[in-house]
Amino acid sequence: VDESDYLAIGAGLGSFFWADLLRISGVRAEKIVGLGLEAEPYARYKRLCLNSQIPLHERLRSNSDSCPDNIWGWPSYALREAWHDFTKGQMKSAFKYLWQVFAEPTFAETYTPRAGNVFDSIDRETKRIGWNQIYRYGRVRVIRKTDDGRYCVAYSRGPGNYAFLVSRYLHLATGYPAIQFLPDLQAYREKYQDFKSVVNAYEAHDHVYEQLEQHGGTVLIRGRGIVASRIVQRIYEARKRNQNIAVLHLMRSPKPQGNKFQNTQRLVKNHYEFQPFNWPKACWGGELRAMLEKATPDERKRLLADWGGTTTADRQDWQQITAQGLSEGWYQITFGEVLDVERDAQNRTITRIREQSFGEMKLLADFIVDATGLDAKVDANPLLADLVKHYNLPVNHLGRLTVANNFELVEMRSDRGQMYAAGAITLGGPYAAVDSFLGLQYAALVAVDGLSAARAPGVQKLNTISSFRQWLKWVLNQSP
Ligand SMILES: Cc1cc2nc3c(=O)[nH]c(=O)nc-3n(C[C@H](O)[C@H](O)[C@H](O)COP(=O)(O)OP(=O)(O)OC[C@H]3O[C@@H](n4cnc5c(N)ncnc54)[C@H](O)[C@@H]3O)c2cc1C
């Protein structure tokens, strides 16, 4: 049995942001433990990016000043990339990035950083704060309150190798526990035990593109969010090697117009709905954040439905690919409700749909890519399910953990300790953009404020001077 003052469960990006802020607020690395399954805090995130066809040179979907390595957000990624290109003599691209952040989103496409640059910058910050001292390998099985007002965490280090950690302050950020399959595709996979033809966009599925590039074929895509856009882009690239590739994009219904909220309305083209990020920008720190925080649970449900939903980024290259595919005929959009998915004698998938005007139809495809999402409901994660059941914790309308405005799990408070949560497992509560770099940093900020108010050991609330001093240390790459 070990003890620590601060314990972050998950050791992914949400845990890293909390530990980063604790370090910047004065807590020593040896007082913090990050328990998880992979040493790099972005390991799972990077895997999901690569699987869903975001290679390192591709751009993510977050703002220039949404910096996982830097809580101040300055210098932003656009500034860093512009400076990098400027020093290489690439003036045109350097000025383009600066113009983008000046004129976005009305007069220029919103700037987003390259995945590789983001991972490199996190590497620098992990070294700076001593993350290798904080991280510990372990799969957390159970969390319980102790008699002396702390928390005990049981975790496994391998088969038959269990250990315990007792801590006063817990932070829970376990991310998405599961890949979500549409029920008819799940039924197909179970019936035919075929995990190669029907895949989820978030699982490793490069074999699909390799086979298409070699032999050609047809891909059926389900879902019309940003992941679907990335899959279409990947197939567009595969078509440069083999023109014999076609895409059937199956959507449940047409999308004639975008969501409206007050005086604003989202743009729609070819049944894709656009929004630079997955939430309106004011959800992160503007008036929509304050509005949601004040709202009742019922109002939150309505507001989240208005602001969220399935959208993709307003990228010119993607719109061009869609328009080109439609005019050349290799990309087709079909609307219909899926009745079932079967397999024919040539091992091709047959999707039977009810189409609005033609009635029942069969769509033949070599592959089906489910681009509809990931699951973060409490009951999909045994650790969270046990916690909710044992302590009778409330869950919100989306089946996630109910948190206070500062992300505390209030029902878990004990005499000497506090417990916080962050990330997708808290969606549906006081903050919309919980599953984003800046949202996770915001959650860490308000949680650490809560710790400082509770006079947690070693936590000094940042003020203008101490924050500036810490920023200088960041610039000089010195330990906090
Ligand atoms: C494909 C994709 C692209 C995204 N792009 C962006 C973007 O461009 N910009 C942006 O701001 N946000 C983006 N996000 C959202 C967000 O930034 C990420 O989802 C982020 O990784 C969330 O951090 P997290 O800590 O909640 O989860 P993760 O980073 O997934 O970390 C959770 C960790 O907990 C571990 N874990 C789970 N259960 C246990 C257990 N019982 N014991 C021990 N460890 C456990 C997991 O193994 C995992 O490593 C994207 C998300 C995805 C999926």
Image: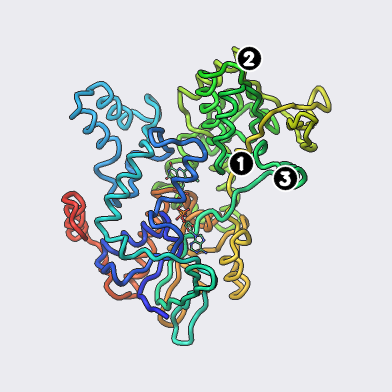
Q: Which residue is mark 1?
A: 200
x and y percentages locating residue 438 in the rendered image:
39, 49
Snapshot quadrant of residue 159 = bottom right
Residue at image x 60%, y 12%? 328
* Numbered marks: total: 3
- The amino acid type found where label 2 is placed reads Gly
Q: Compared to 385, does 265 lie above or below?
A: above
Residue at image x 40%, y 46%? 286
Earlier along the polypeptide chain: callout 3 or callout 2? Answer: 3
- The amino acid type found where label 1 is placed reads Asn
Q: Which residue is mark 3?
A: 193
Quick one: SS at disc 1? strand
**In this rendering, the label closer to the viewer, 1 or 3:** 3
Q: Which residue is mark 2?
A: 329
Q: Quadrant of the N terminus?
A: bottom left
In this rendered view, identify the residue nearer to me: 6 or 265: 6
Q: Is residue 360 left or right of residue 75?
A: right
Measured in 3D between alpha carbons, the distance from the residue under mark 3 to the one under mark 2, in whole angstroms, is 32 Å
- Mark 3: give few (<14), some (14-19) or many (20+) Cα within 10 Å: few
Name of the residue lying farthest toward the right: 359
